[in-house]
Every structure is written in C-alpha cells, then in structure tokens.
Image: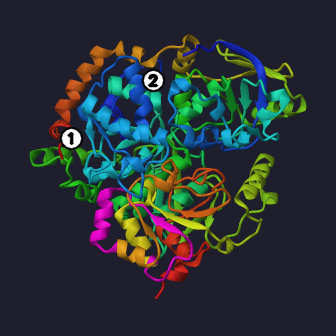
C-alpha cells in the first residue's frame, strides 16, 4: 500500500509508461497548439512523421493574430501572417481540432482550453508556451515545452521528464478589499523569487485559494512560471466541477459520473509530504505593482522604488542600477508618482470575464487620460462582455475595445509599446522589450490597470474603489 | 544534433541575474524558419542599438570576448518564455556551454535538444569564474563533459553534476524521438489501458465538431 500521495504524484503515476536512466516516459493526455507551434509541425514534416493522436491535440491562433479585425490580411508582418495561415493548413492535414480565427471559440490558448472543457482535472496537458501552467487551476498537471518537445509529443504522444520536487504554497485568510488574485501571485513571486520554484511543481492550498473562483485560480497558476516553477496546480473541488459541467468538451451523462468519481480521488492525501512549504497571510496583502524587469521586482503599491544601495549583493546592486536606468525610475520614488503612457488589459493572466468586470467597475468611474486597450482573452469572453454591456462602459470611458489575442502581452501582432514608453499592463512579464523594443512594463491587476488609465499614473485602486 | 564532448574556448562573463529568453531571442524574430539561422538574433537588443549598429559596451561586442563559445552568467539564466529559439540563437551564435547558478526550467529541457550544455555551479564558484574572466579578458575555460569537469582560467578544476540521461544524449548527440519510438510497444499498451480508464477523454466526436 502506497503512503499518502500529493495531487501531482497521483497524476504522475497515472501517466507513467516507464522509467529509464532516471527519466520518466509520460503519456500526454492533451496537447494544445497555437500559431507558434509552426516550428514543431515543420520539424515533424521534415522527418516524414505523422501526428500520432490527432484527437488529443486542440489548437487556436493567438500570438500573432490581429486585434483590430479578424482578417489575416491585417497582420502586417509577413512572417507572422505565414505562421497564422499555416495553422489551419496543418489542422486540415493532420486532422486535429482547430478553433480558427473566424471561429467564435478562438482565443488565447490558455483561456480557450478551460473554457471549452478541453482542460480537465487529472490530465497531463502540455503546450508550446510557458504559461500552460494556467491549466493547473483545474487540477491538471500542465506545463510548457519547447519546439523539439512539441514535435516529440506530435510524433509519440509522450514526453521524458524527471520527477519534479513538490512545493506547497499555502495562503490563508481573507483578502482585503482591492486585493486581487494577481496581487496574491505577485506577492508569492516577490517572496520566493523569480527562480524560487525551480525544479518544483507548486500546489496552491489554503482558505484563500479555496475561496477563489476557478478563474482567479487560473491567474495564480498562470504566473507559477514567473516564480520559476515547472507548473502550478490547485486541487479540484466543487467549484471546479461546477465550472466544467456542460462545457463542450467536458464529459457528459454517464461519462460525467465516471469522471467525477475519478476527479474526487485526486486531491493530495492528508499527511502527503511536500519538499518545500511556503505560507502567506492573505489578510496582510496589498495591491501589488512591479517596478523592475523581473516579476520578482514586485512591491505593494504604497511602496517606493528601491535604492540599489540597499541591494543584498553586489551582482544585485548592479542589476538594480541597470534596471532603474532602463525603467527610467529614481531610487526612493513613490510608486504612485510614476506616470504611465498607456494601459493594456488582457492576456492569458487577466483576460477572462471576471477580469473585464473588475476593470470595467473602475473604468465606469471616469475617463481614460492615456491610451488604453482592452483585448478579451477569447472571442467567447468578448461576446459575454458585450452581452453584459462591458464594452460600452469601456468605450464610454475612452478605452479601445479590441478582438481577442495575445496582443500587447508579447507584441507579436504589432500591438506594441514604443521605446521608452511606460505601460500599466495586466500581463505577466515585465522583461525588457517584452512589449516592444525599449518598452517599460508595470504589471498589476485589471482593476489597478483601469485605475492607472483614469489617472495617468500608477494608482492605488483602493482610493478609487470606495463610495 | 552535434555531440558535445570537450570544449576549450574563450568564455564571456554576463554579470546580471535573470537573463530571460526574451533577452536571448526577442519575440519579433521567432517566426523565422529554423534553417535560416538565428546567429544574428542572439541577445539582439542588448547587442545592437539599431540593425547592424553594435553597442560597444555589450560584452560579446568587446574584442577579447567576440569569439566566446562559453558564457558564465549569474542566477536564473534562461527563465521565462518556452521559446526554443533562445537555444537556437545561442548555438548558432557559437555558444555551446553556459555556466550559471541556476537556469529556467523549460530552457533547461530545451538546451539538450540543441546540443547546448548547461552547467550549474554554486554561487561562489560562478562569481570566482566571472572575476577571472574580467581580470583576464579573453581567458579560456575547458569543459570536459565525459569527466564532468571544468578547468578555470587559473587552472583550478571544478567538478559538476549532470543527470546520466542528459549526459548520454549530449555526448552522443542522440535524437530523442528515435529513442522514444524504441518503446513503441510499451507506449501502445499503456495507451490502451489509459483509454479504458479514462474513456471520456476520447468521446468528443469528430475533430472540428463542437
Ligand atoms: S497572452 Fe502572453 S503569456 Fe499568454 S500565451 Fe499569449 S503571449 Fe503568452
């Protein structure tokens, strides 16, 4: 009889084909593809190999798609256009399911997977994109892979992996008003560091996580990669099942009952051991914002830009100095004194309906004084938002209402932040040049980003949200 | 993939932590076909002020380090995006080995596929290596994968750990898909069991159906 096991160990054991040389050969339950998977399909073709299991691959274009229209011709960069056009060709050739550019089910792959019920508890799910960790919010083991491994999955439906270590991040207590799921994960990353989760799969636990909606858990799991972790996950519970029930690719009828019985066995057993434990008190959290070029450079919005003189090491001091120069910030400057040039609301981190509702609730209180764009995480999210009148709120407040795609999170479709410009963004990476060469990014929650649009500077949303 | 056995080459110090894959290979270059090469993409925005205009201060633009085939970085090298183009850019740009305190996980997995050796050493060892490279620009480091040993510019030998599977794949330049397909029977048998255990995963109708 095996001892108590974690959620991760249960999923791992259920997909383990064999072990060799300390590496595990794992079956991949679901593979998600997007326009960027093009290199992997090219590699498959070059070797004359077939897609082994078309019924286990699902795809949608997102990285390079235009947000001003649904027309491929509106993609300015010919290399991007070629890649977006290759996806339907590959779908027709290999026979996998595609939610194409003109399909209402299109969207950012990490929003679409859960939305369609393709993502389910207990699965190993992979995708050629690091934020695949998002899907762990439903109790799956989901992680990003590179092009060679995507080709490997296409050809074999398997992957080689070492057993990861496990980390439990327990967040307890009630979140204060104004503190979003984004703030929780930014606080976790600030605490453990951008490499703090390396080699580990994080399971998020505790009353704060349990109280979160499934969408909020997705925001948390999404940014596990920014903590350096291989994946993030949350044990499935009644909220997960309720979320999945009735979705197009979720089990139905007798299958639902069988699936549900299995899913209920997944949560970590009492007494299961984790290699590392981290605890956070939600009651002490504040809205967070990043000041630097690593997601670990996150502080409560009430804070000040750090002084390199206070850095913990010489390497860190040099890095902070360069960061402040790149970001155009002064040591000791109040974060709320930083003026922004533009605002982006969207991405797989914060482009779901609840995110748009949170942003709209702030947007309706004023008018944007800097350019602000909203790109819903999927076309279905866009339609839902329109049905709720959120598009009208945004438009009336001077925000641009766009089509769905990765957009300014990565800037591959031409939605860019110009050199030296500063963007308040709900995306997940504040790396140098991430939103365009020379761009300066400050990560924050959707409500905080909307607040920044109304004031033109980084703003504590709690000052706007009252009354 | 080109096997990795031993390498003696100029090493360049990269002092900053968190050099992410967006720095190694910026997003706008990622759609280029693999065979067209990624050498000019490597550290593009750190290296060039404008296309073809070098930033003289960037380490790989300084004469002693131009021929570097080894990088000594800091903490969390290659974190962030899963883009394997970061590995392609390094390898095409001549870099076959990166030494650092820690690496991004996905980058770590991708590196082997391109024949790039990543070596993890402790912080003091990495810092000492970088100090030597600054003190003697153009100094060489020797990496011996078989013996799992690095010879620093000062002649000191440093041992490093590597998993047997990674080591074998790098030494022999093995192709992973070929390796995996040797297990075809085991995979097929496992798949049959999986379908029986989780039938609902396979009952979503014809591809393309909603
Ligand atoms: S929205 Fe951004 S992080 Fe998410 S998949 Fe697209 S590019 Fe990646």
In the depicted structure, whether residue A350 falls above or below residue B114 = below
Cα–Cα gap, marks 2 and 1: 35 Å
Residue B117: quadrant of the picture: top right
SS assignment at label 2:
strand
Please give the residue where the numbered disc 2 appears in the rendered image.
A23
Q: Which of marks 2 and 1 is in front?
A: 1
State the image coordinates of residue B30 (x, y, percent, origin top left): 53, 37
| Other residues around mark 2 within 10 Å, as few (<14) / some (14–19) / many (≥20) | some
Please give the residue where the numbered disc 1 appears in the rendered image.
B208
State the image coordinates of residue A359 (x, y, percent, origin top left): 44, 71
Q: On what subunit does the disc labeled 1 rest?
A: B
Residue depicted at 80% across the width and 28% down the height: B65
Q: Quadrant of the N terminus of chain A?
A: top left
Give the magenta-colored segment's residue range.
A363-390
Residue depicted at 82% across the width and 39% down the height: B56
In the depicted structure, whether residue B98 falls above or below residue A83 = above
**Cβ–Cβ below 8 Å for labels 2 and 1?**
no
Residue B5: quadrant of the picture: top right
State the image coordinates of residue B147 (x, y, percent, origin top left): 67, 13
């Amino acid at each position: 009889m095996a001892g108590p096991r974690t959620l991760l160990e249960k999923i791992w054991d259920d997909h383990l084909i064999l072990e060799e040389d300390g590496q595990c050969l794992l079956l991949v339950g679901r593979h998600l593809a997007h326009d960027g998977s093009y290199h992997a399909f090219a590699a498959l073709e070059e070797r004359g190999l077939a897609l082994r299991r078309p019924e286990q691959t699902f795809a949608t274009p997102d990285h390079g798609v235009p947000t001003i229209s649904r027309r491929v011709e509106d993609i300015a960069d010919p290399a991007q256009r070629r890649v977006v056009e290759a996806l339907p060709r590959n779908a027709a050739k290999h026979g996998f399911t595609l939610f194409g550019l003109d399909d209402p089910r299109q969207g950012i792959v990490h929003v679409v997977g859960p939305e369609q019920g393709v993502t389910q508890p207990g699965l190993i799910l992979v995708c050629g994109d690091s934020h695949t960790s998002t899907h762990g919010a439903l109790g799956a083991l989901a992680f990003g892979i590179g092009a060679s491994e995507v080709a490997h999955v296409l050809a074999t439906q398997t992957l080689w992996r070492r057993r990861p270590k496990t980390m439990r991040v327990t967040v307890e207590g009630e979140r204060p008003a104004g503190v979003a799921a984004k703030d929780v994960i930014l606080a976790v990353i600030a605490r453990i560091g951008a490499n703090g989760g390396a080699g580990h799969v994080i399971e998020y636990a505790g009353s704060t996580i349990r109280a979160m909606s499934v969408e909020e858990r997705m925001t948390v799991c999404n940014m596990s990669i920014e903590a350096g972790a291989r994946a993030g996950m949350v044990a499935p519970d009644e909220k997960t099942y309720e979320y999945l029930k009735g979705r197009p690719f979720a089990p139905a009828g007798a299958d639902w009952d069988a699936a549900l019985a299995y899913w209920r066995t997944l949560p970590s057993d009492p007494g299961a051991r984790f290699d590392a434990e981290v605890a956070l008190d939600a009651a002490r959290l504040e809205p967070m914002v990043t000041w630097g070029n690593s997601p670990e450079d996150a502080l409560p919005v009430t804070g000040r830009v750090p002084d390199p003189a206070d850095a913990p090491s010489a390497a860190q001091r040099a890095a902070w100095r360069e960061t402040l120069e790149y970001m155009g910030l002064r040591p000791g400057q109040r974060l709320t004194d930083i003026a922004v040039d533009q605002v982006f609301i969207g991405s797989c981190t914060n482009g779901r309906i609840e995110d748009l509702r949170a942003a709209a609730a702030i947007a309706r209180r004023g008018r944007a004084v800097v350019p602000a764009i909203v790109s819903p995480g999927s076309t279905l999210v866009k339609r839902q938002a329109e049905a709720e009148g959120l598009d009208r709120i945004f438009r009336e407040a001077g925000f641009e209402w766009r089509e769905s795609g990765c957009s300014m999170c990565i800037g591959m479709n031409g939605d860019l932040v110009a050199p030296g410009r500063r963007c308040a963004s709900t995306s997940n990476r504040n790396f140098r040049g991430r939103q365009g060469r020379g761009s300066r990014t400050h990560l924050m929650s959707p409500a905080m980003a909307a607040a920044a649009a109304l004031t033109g500077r980084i703003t504590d949303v709690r000052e706007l949200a009252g009354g | 993939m080109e096997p990795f056995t031993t390498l003696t080459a100029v090493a360049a110090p990269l002092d900053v932590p968190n050099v992410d894959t967006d720095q190694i290979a910026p997003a706008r270059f990622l759609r280029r076909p693999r065979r067209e090469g990624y050498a000019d993409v490597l550290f593009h925005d750190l290296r060039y002020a404008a296309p073809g205009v070098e930033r003289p201060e960037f380490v790989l633009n300084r004469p002693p380090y131009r021929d570097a085939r080894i990088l000594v970085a800091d903490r969390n090298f290659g974190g962030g995006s899963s883009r394997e183009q970061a590995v392609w850019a390094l390898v095409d740009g001549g870099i076959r080995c990166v030494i650092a305190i820690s690496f991004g996980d996905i980058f770590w997995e991708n590196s082997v596929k391109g024949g790039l050796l990543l070596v993890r050493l402790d912080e003091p060892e990495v810092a000492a290596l970088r100090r030597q490279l600054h003190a003697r620009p153009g100094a060489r480091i020797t990496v011996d994968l078989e013996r799992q040993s690095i010879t620093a510019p000062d002649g000191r030998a440093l041992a490093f750990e590597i998993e047997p599977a990674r080591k074998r794949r790098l030494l022999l330049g093995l192709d992973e898909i070929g390796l995996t397909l040797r297990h075809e029977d085991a995979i097929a048998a496992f798949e049959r069991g999986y379908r029986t255990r989780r039938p609902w995963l396979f009952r979503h109708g014809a591809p393309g159906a909603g």
